[in-house]
Image (cartoon, rainbow, N blue to C red):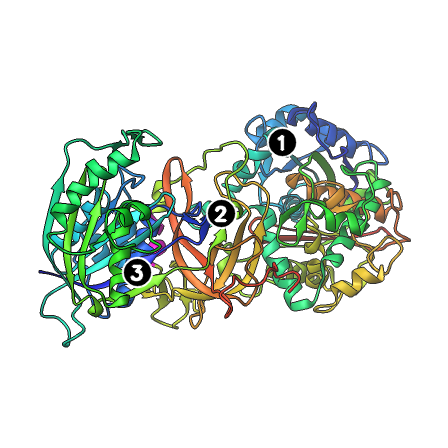
Amino acid sequence: MIGAGMLPFGELFGTGMKEMLPAAMRAATGSVDKGIAPGEFEAAWFGNLQPSDGFPAGVLADSCGLLDIPVTRVENQCATGNDAVRNAALAVGAGAVDVALVIGADKTRETSTLTTFWDWMGMARDMAWDYPLGLIAPASFALHVARYMHECDARPEHLAMVAVKNHHNAVTNPKAHLRFEVTVEQVLAAPRVAGPFGVLDCAPQSDGAAAVILAAGEIADRYTSRPVWVRGFGLALDRVMHAHKQDMTRFPSTLRAAAAAFGMAGIGPGDIDVAEVHDCFSGVELMNYEDLGFCGRGEAPKLIESGATAVGGRIPVNPSGGLKAKGHPPGATGVAQCVELFQQLRGEAANQVADPRWGLAHNVGGPTAVSAVTILEAHR
Amino acid sequence: VTVVRAVGLYQPAWAEAGRRVPGPDEDAITMAAAAGRAALSVSPGAAVARVVVIARDPGYLDGAPLPVLTAALCADPAAAAATPAELRIGAAPAVIDAVSTAAPGTLVIAVETGPDGGAAAVLIGAPETGPPGTGGARLDDLAVAGHSLPMRVRATGAAQPSAYADPRAERELGWRPAIAVLAAGTEKPVLTGIPAADARRLGGQDPGELAAGAAAPLFALARMAEQGQDGRLIGLDAGLGAAVSVSKASELRVAADARPPLPASGRPRVSGAGTVIPMSMPSYERAVDAKLGLVGARCTVCGTESYPRRTVCLGCGTHDSTGPFALPRRGEVYSVVTVHVPVPGVPTPRGLAVVALTPTTVRVLAHVTDTVPDGCAIGDTGDLVLRLAAVRQGVPDYGYAFRPDLTAAGEPAPTGNGATS
């Protein structure tokens, strides 16, 4: 990874998809130490969940002036961003492409808040069985977290601690959507959304775009003397209907994706120095701690209580503010996690973790049925 | 003589000013299904040959989803589809007439969807069925009395009836002469279909706390059965009356599906701007038999159960290896949350639960119904009941909702959303 950049996430009413994509590409090219011209890209992958202003791959090629290279749109629900990175990494690793552009972008605020649920859910739920029941995203995840809390003795305060931590991190991240502190009391007193989640337990609906540039290892030094290395990745699925999920206290897709990524990188969870994980809802971050191996089964409440996942802790999680506070334009989210890790592993992050070597990015999404994990290593 | 083997009663859980009112996921079809299932629950071995539904306001004229009702009443989807069902518009007299003239095997279901809502179903038996003393109530001597000038008229599309502004004239000119004919000399007939105060003034028996409208005479019949009381049963409407003599009332089996009232102010409701929820008819059509009939699938190779049916077995991966089996209609909550935010087309606050249908390994995702918000917790047991899940592009989409059992004290389960329990 030779470059990475992103737009500030937020309600970007004044910026359409055709403006966001070139701006994200410039943010990434601008970070390449020795410079890069768009003409050097040999292929591009576009992580995008919901098309905006038309045919996604064409909008990217047209708006960025990349008409001479293949552009492939990747859609894999909330794992879209890290899956786009994975596809580009496969092409580069296979030797088919020397320099690849990955952009992730979505405009969740392009439709009204009331209909966005339905515009997007039609893709993500069984039309006959689950969709008519109104299984909106917060309810879908809340069914997992409610069972997790029941079995693992997690309290609402533990969920709130995740929101407090990630909001705190976002305050000092200029790219974050929600840059304000919250308290445990405020989170617990916020209007209820679904199950154990109140408004302050939920990620915002954000617009945003992020980009990374991958290059073959042999030529990386043409662009920078301190690249970040893609060492492992995994993508995995699970049963799509909640009725078919045997143990809802875990996300089996995360277990599978993490096993693949750790196996490829040749490291284990204990090696990770900084992680960006999928905290679309506060309690999901707790479940991720366990699924990713940062702590044992049922130990996530203790881990968040201990401060280990704060910046400065044993395993800082979501120093960017996470989805919870940095924001969540789904196609951009995973790519933006890699942007954060790129900066962390080069010592350039807004909330810098002390001298990290290994970084991990993670998404879980759709009907809690797809996960992607990317493992990056600092240049040494 | 018509023999009535069993009567099933259903009253909605919600109440407003002391009167039961349907929940937002109930309509004539779901209430009829509840009453029909109650009647069949005390009619072992009974086969339903025909279903007749009678309501003042059925909610449907064209496109009445009667196949949904037969699917809910018959275990076998093929039998359900082949069971004739008809919808009649009428009130108390129409019900007495329908019951008295129905052939054995007919399930007559009367529904009231307004205030004092409820439904009652009777299963008509053959005169010779059953051991002595268990054959059912006998109904005979049907009489009807018309009246040329109805004093209470609700025109098509009108929300409220237009009434002649003199209740005393309605009682004395409309009902008293009809009762004189219909009572056929009987002292103290049971009068239904009119307000209880009018029934007492007109020399009838107070029929007790009843569902109104079409359901009233069958609720009264159930009360006669429970009290072992024979007599003349009269049903009145604005312009019509019908009566029948009831004997051997004590032989009638009664089953009631009713719960302590919950304040109707707490009913979930649709809020926010109206949004049309898309519907895919082909998708619905592929699902409907399994959905309405609660038909699970079991692998003939390894025995793994699934719902809905899958091409590839969850257990052994064999393709197209499953056969159907009937799912239990009771279950235990594996996880549950209350959705508080407005969801287009779905009344909120609304519980959503993953329910394990023990002893099978099947779980279902279902709305939680007939509870206050957060009135259902992990581990609760309860029933799957037919409800209206949503209206999609104008098409009613029915499915099974989870209704938690009441506690021993007759109260809904203690509050808790699983997070704090």
Q: Which dot marks residue B264?
A: 2
Residue at the image point whose x is 84% and y is 60% from the top: A308
Image coordinates of residue B204 in percent, x first then y, are 24, 52
Q: Which residue is mark 3?
A: B37
Q: Name the mark on residue A69.
A: 1
> How many residues crowd mark 3 within 10 Å: few (<14), some (14–19), many (20+)?
many
| Residue B8 visible within the image | yes
Which mark lies nearer to you, 1 or 2?
Answer: 2
Look at the numbered disc 2 and give the secondary structure of its residue.
Answer: helix
Q: Give the crowd class for mark 1: few <14, some 14-19, many >=20 residues within 10 Å.
A: some
Query: Between residues B312 and B71, which one lies in front from this camera angle?
Result: B71
Task: Tell me, yes or no, whether the highlighted magenta stretch contains residue B289.
Answer: yes
Q: Is residue B255 left or right of residue B359?
A: left
How far is mark 3 from mark 2, CA to CA?
A: 24 Å
- Left or right: residue B49 versus residue A55 is left
Q: Determine the residue positioned at 81% across, 31% down.
A: A30
Q: Chain of mark 2?
A: B
Is most of the magenta stretch helix, strand or loop? helix
Mark 1 or 3, closer to the camera: 3
Q: Is residue A236 left or right of residue B216?
A: right
Does A265 appear above or below B20? below
Tag 2: residue type?
Ala
State whether discs 3 and 2 lie on one chain: yes
Q: How many marks?
A: 3
> At 35% across and 32% down in the image, what residue appears?
B160
What residue is shown at x 20% (from left), y 60% (from top)? Answer: B123
Instruction: Identify which amino acid the numbered label 3 is placed on.
Output: Arg
Bounds of the magenta segment? B285-293
Where is B151 relative to B254, above or below? above
